Image (tube, grey):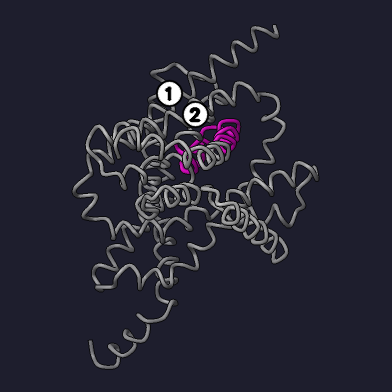
Amino acid sequence: MNPRLDEIWVYLSTTPLLGLTLTLVAYQCAWWLYRRAGFHPAANPVMIAVAILVGVLSLTGTDYQTYFDGAQFVHFLLGPATVALAIPLYAQLPRLKAMLLPLAGALLAGSLTAALSAFAIGAALGASTQSLMSLAPKSVTTPIAMGVAESLGGLPSLTAVLVIITGILGAVGARGLFAVLRIDDHAVRGFATGVAAHGIGTARAFQVSEQCGAFAALAMGLNGLLTALSLPYILPWLARLTGH
Amino acid sequence: MIGALTLLLVYQLVGEVIARGLDLPVPGPVIGMLLLFLTLVVRGRVDAELRGTANGLLQHLSLLFVPAGTGIMLHYQRLADEWLPLLAGVLGSTLLAMAVTALVLRVLSRKRAGEEG
């Protein structure tokens, strides 16, 4: 680099502008690739954007904290976005009323299975306590999962990564799983996908059918709520029980 | 849009105050979501501005995960050490949860349909 460029870089790397702009540019590139891949779940835009950013930050020797000073403006919007989930949830109110009991039963069973089996498998294979607390809330949408992980003493940024992997695996695996179980009803398929694989699963379900997507959105909202309300009470108890 | 954004932030702030004030382990924005949901149920409608702003935010929800996801940089060592329990935990629990939810929902809705029919 000539001295001039060097000065510009020194200036830019200390302002929030660079981290913020990099985030948006990486996301635009990721979205373009996702569209080119015909919205295939394996080409998840979050995963691609993160890969681009990790590459750029590593190559330029920028540490995460410096990057996050700029990216925090995007990150902050997760709070109001979580509050905004009330609106699609409200739009499902008539369906919610009509199928209240079966949905409540399935939600409770699925939500507990997601968190407890993640904890059990992780613990059986020797994960650390902090990893287990980051792993347990991984089936719910990122802003909620990160908040729950934080209150459990896990690592929110690790949870964010695990949530995204969960969504991708759920979206890719759903079709095969429902074929094996012989479940054809789109309401049932959508609801199960939303409980287990949150927003990424929901996005996928909307591509299957409108009904499938609506039930997935409903399940995602309800499971977020149930997990946020139940895990902070259940997990510390479970951790004590298993010696973590 | 500014009005709706203000409303969302006010609900988040109230949620945060309740969570900290009552020492609840639930994230503040979740309490905000619950309060907004209850408000909508009581009012019985969502105005167009709020729906538009919420749709705008939620359409680009994936973007909002990117800064946190990039935090994977901080966890290389942990992922290298614990990749098996973490990956097996995520994969196993996701498929199990999907199967359990679907099967329970099918059984319960059939039972109910049977009772009503």
Image quadrant assignment for residue B67: bottom left
Q: Residues within 10 Å of mark 2 (few under 14, many from 20)?
A: many
Identified at 48% across, 62% down, the residue is A75
Subunit ID for the residue under disc 1: B
Q: Secondary structure at mark 1?
A: helix
Q: Which residue range is magenta in the image? A: A197-219
**Which of B76 and A125 lies nearest the eye of the viewer?**
A125
Image quadrant assignment for residue A100: top right
Subunit ID for the residue under disc 2: A
Image quadrant assignment for residue A220: top right
Asked whether the residues under the numbered discs 2 and 1 touch, taking CB atoms below 8 Å apart as contact, a structural biologist would say: yes
Quarter of the figure with the N terminus of chain B: bottom right
Residue hosting label 2:
A192
In the rendered image, residue A236, in percent from the top left (x then y), is placed at: 41, 40
**Which of A164 and A243 lies nearest the eye of the viewer?**
A243
Identified at 34% across, 52% down, the residue is A158
Q: Are marks 2 and 1 on the same chain?
A: no
Residue A209 painted magenta: yes
In the rendered image, residue A44, in percent from the top left (x then y), is placed at: 39, 48
Residue B97 painted magenta: no
Question: Where residue B99 is drawn, which disc sits there?
Answer: 1
- Which secondary structure is most common in the magenta stretch? helix
Q: Amino acid at mark 2?
A: Ala
Pick out the residue farthest to the left.
B81
A216 vs B43, left or right, is: left
Q: Amino acid at mark 1?
A: Ala
Distance CA(mark 2)–CA(mark 1): 7 Å
Query: Is residue B58 visible from the viewing direction of this image?
Result: no
